[in-house]
Amino acid sequence: MSTYDVAIIGSGPGGYVAAIRCAQLGMKTALIEKYDTLGGTCLNVGCIPSKALLDSSEHFHNAKHNFTEHGINITGLEADINQMIARKAEVVSQTCNGIKFLMDKNNVTVYNGWGSFASKNSILIKGKDSEETIEAKNIIIATGSKPNFFPGMEPDKDRIITSTEALKMKEIPKRLLVIGGGVIGLELGSVYARLGSEVEVVEFADSIIPTMDKTLGKELTRVLKKEGFKFHMEHKVQSVVNTGKGVKLTALNKKDQEVVLEADYCLVAVGRKAYTAGLNLENAGLTANNRGQVEVNDHLQTSIPNIYAIGDVVRGAMLAHKAEEEGVYVAELIAGQKPHINYNLIPGVVYTWPEVAAVGKTEEELKAAGVEYKVGSFPIKALGRARASMDTQGLVKILADKNTDEVLGVHMIAPRAADLIMEAVVAMEYRASAEDIARICHPHPTYSEAIKEAALDATAARALHV
């Protein structure tokens, strides 16, 4: 029987990064993955393929709507969904192969098969044609999550689909219903809206991206409506039925009136849930909570000291980069180091266009906590760089402590906001004030100038270019 210092169940961003860091720290490491390819949801049916389709659809949208104004004339433009899906598949393949290369480079032993606990120190691995058991001093659960749904909206993977099926469509729907106004629904809705689908979003809350600052939800709603999105806020879905050639969705609005919507497909995007089924946690002395999650302490350690859990399978935001940080954290903890994660400074991103990004506290959270704060904001349309690129929608909003000027939260809708937000993360990591950011020289013309201007506005209401 093979014995390891660390065995990791699940090869998503949390699992494979944990494996790399464990190996770097000199531990004999095993990585167990039930599928034939590494990378988990993120690389195979999540972050990477969705961004590939978002980029393809954005190119098409620009060619159709913006190129003429740039002096570029195109005739016979059409979207080839099959080629887009094929390109997406190639991006996924290259990325997953890259993870396999990293495992080989770091001497991580990879097992392809279903891993489950035989005991607190042993894992049974069932492959296609065989099974074996390995021993490990420490075990990390990194099994991730799967698409969630509620009664009445059960996916049939034909007309009522999840994000997995939406990433391999064989046609561009004329009409697409999206249940859920969160990250997944809006990103995949954007893909097909750009390609010509009529997209309608049904959301239970009173705004889209409801966990983010309300300013962002309002601004993104305005942007997406201009792209043709229709929104049904405060609607509770009662049922979704596959009619054979389409779907029929029945919901109740906030007045409890019945609303019926019809389309070609319905994307169920109401979040994800922890995936612990089949782990046989009880054999290790563990149980999942009522949300299917593995309970951990502040060190990501379960009630069994040698077993840890990270990523989507534990509490907190379901983000690939959060899982990566936790993977590194656990590896270094096992090695005897003293790592640290500041969960308040893990940024969130929505990859619509313009992108949405945020870090720190929302205005609503500061109000609820009774914190005295001040607000600085700056519109993207006031930037010379934005006018040059025809990307003029959005804003940057900075929240700072009223008394100390320390930056408490940064929220933005902007071109390349996913990259711009890191200026705020770095600043907040070092507890910068709004004035600190305002006094840093930003290159011109760039989108980053909006952050400086918002900081100026927060400092003394003295933005220069509005």
Image (spheres, helix red, strand yellow):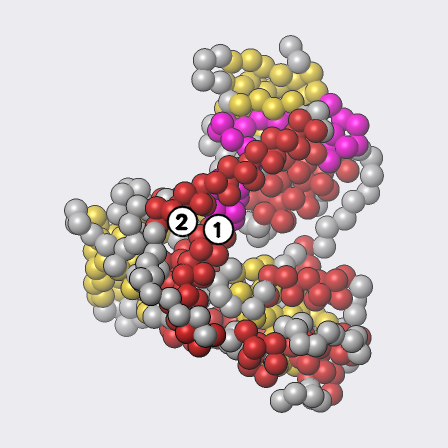
Residue 31, how many percent across, how many down?
Answer: 62, 27
Q: Amino acid at mark 1?
A: Ala
Residue 130 left/right relative to 254? right
Residue 461, how many percent across, how many down?
Answer: 69, 88
48 magenta-colored: yes
- Which residue shows up at 63% across the image and 61% down it? 419
Secondary structure type for disc 1? helix
Residue 234 left/right relative to 142? left
What residue does disc 1 label? 52
What residue does disc 2 label? 84
How packed is label 2: few (under 14 Cα within 10 Å), some, or many (20 or more)? many
* Residue bounds of the magenta highlight: 21-49
State which tag comes first along the sequence, 1 or 2.
1
Residue 98, how many percent across, how many down?
Answer: 60, 36
Front one among 155 and 168: 168
- Which residue shows up at 58% across the image and 14% down it? 133
Residue 194 lies, with reference to residue 322, above or below; the image says: below
Q: Amino acid at mark 2?
A: Met
Residue 256, how many percent across, how many down?
Answer: 26, 68
Secondary structure type for disc 2? helix
Residue 261 lies, with reference to residue 130, above or below; the image says: below
Front one among 24 and 156: 24
Q: Tell me the tag on residue 153.
A: none
* Res. 450 in view: yes
Residue 324 lies, with reference to residue 418, above or below; the image says: above
